Image (cartoon, helix red, strand yellow):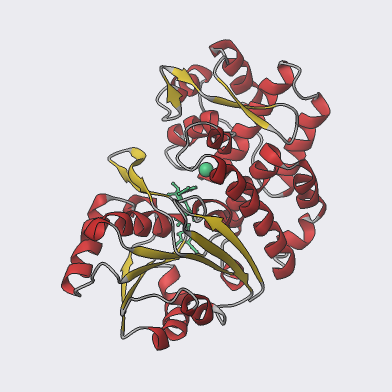
Amino acid sequence: MEYQMTVKREGEFTYDIEWHNTFEGLGKAVEKLSLMSRKACIVTDSTVGPLYLNTVSRQLSPLFDKITSFSFPSGEAQKTLDTVKKLYTHLIEEHYERKDILIALGGGVVGDLTGYTAATYLRGIDFIQIPTTLLSQVDSSVGGKTGVDFDCFKNMVGAFHQPRLVYMSMETLHTLPDVQFSCGMGEVLKSGLIRDLPYYQWTLEHSRELLERKDEVLIRMIQGSCLIKKTVVEHDPTEQGERAVLNLGHTIGHAVEKLKNFEMLHGQCVALGTVAAAYISKERGLIDSEALSVIERGNRMFGLPCRFEGLALEEVLSATRSDKKMEQGKIKFILLNPLGHAVVDKTVTDDEMMAAIGYIQG
Ligand code: NAD
Ligand code: MG
């Protein structure tokens, strides 16, 4: 094993996150769990399956009587109850029982959908996360949020359900398309900005090695992000308060994402939304203009946008209102105060948002 971190689950349970260069250590990592399961179902998608399913099955086959796999077409459009239903059918037909286990092999879509199925099948069975995108390694695989989209509502149906293990292999990042890598970097930069300025600065200083995807530097970076997320999530596992800071850049980011009809990816929109949030923070005197330029420079270094085109200001503003992050009709906006520390603020006005949206309009 290369590196390891332990996260508290609900009650007295904990689980480990492990970082490796390859899948070689997977068998050992799963063996340590002393599972009672005889069967494991590897859930994956049509892109990741052909790349890694055989390797992962080979690593796990000595540990189970039977391994089955369930694959669905890749993409957010499949993160639905329909796909969950097909997976339930597979599990029932293959006689999966309460002590058996699901293994999510893929990005955030596979992780969220598998986690939700695990949370609900037979009132909850165990699952393991093997995240294969940078975004899922730094964000969605840690924290226990699982779920699917419903009609056009993102993550509308879900459950909190913690995995038994998160295993990350850096080899998966070598097949990841550049645009997906950038999206993951959007979340990495966000985590530094909300809780750890030295980590943020370290990331910018190591941009060359990171963009070359050097394993050791990637592991350090991913660990840093996971540590930040773990700390925030352990304080507030079900998002009663502090966890909301993880939504930095999401209010305006989500609005743009929705209006662009998913032509811009989530991580790109979060990066853009972060510039908007930083602009409001600067206007309120919480950070200075140099800090705002640093954030824009950081985005550009990793191929992330600072501006958008082709949408009206009013349109973006009204799209922020349907955001899930509302409390009693007030938007829980995340501001920087100061740089490297995010805070929840419910007093951001429409005028402030309009000015920020105007700022990021190219
Ligand atoms: P994704 O799972 O759709 O993966 C992006 C694309 O990359 C897909 O086409 C996938 O097939 C492909 N891919 C995955 N791994 C690959 C690899 N190693 N090599 C080549 N191609 C690969 O999307 P994502 O960006 O990983 O995750 C986004 C999802 O995560 C969204 O549904 C979002 O709602 C969710 N999310 C959840 C949380 C949470 O806390 N649960 C947090 C953030 C995001
Ligand atoms: Mg996000």
Q: Residue furthest bottom?
A: 62
Query: In this view of the protein, can residue 38 be seen by the observer?
Result: yes
Asked if residue 70 is positioned above or below residue 226 in the image, the reply reads: below
Q: Position of residue 8 (x, y in %)?
A: 52, 54
Asked if residue 320 is positioned above or below residue 111 in the image, the reply reads: above
Q: Residue at x 32, y 55 (%)?
A: 119
Asked if residue 127 is positioned above or below residue 246 in the image, the reply reads: below
Asked if residue 233 is positioned above or below residue 322 in the image, the reply reads: below
How many discs appear?
0
Q: What is the quadrant of residue 124 in the picture?
A: bottom left
Q: Position of residue 216 (x, y in %)?
A: 73, 68
Q: Residue at x 48, y 30 (%)?
A: 255
Quadrant in which the N terminus appears: bottom right
Horizontal side of residue 356 vs 159, given as left or right: right
Q: Residue furthest front?
A: 12
Quadrant in which the C terminus appears: top right
Q: Residue at x 44, y 32 (%)?
A: 259
Q: Give whichever of 219, 28 is nearer the camera.
A: 28
Q: What is the quadrant of residue 287 in the picture?
A: top right
Horizontal side of residue 164 vs 37, given as left or right: right
Query: In this view of the protein, can residue 362 be seen by the observer?
Result: no
Q: Position of residue 226 (x, y in %)?
A: 61, 54
Q: Residue at x 39, y 53 (%)?
A: 161
Q: Position of residue 90 (x, y in %)?
A: 21, 69
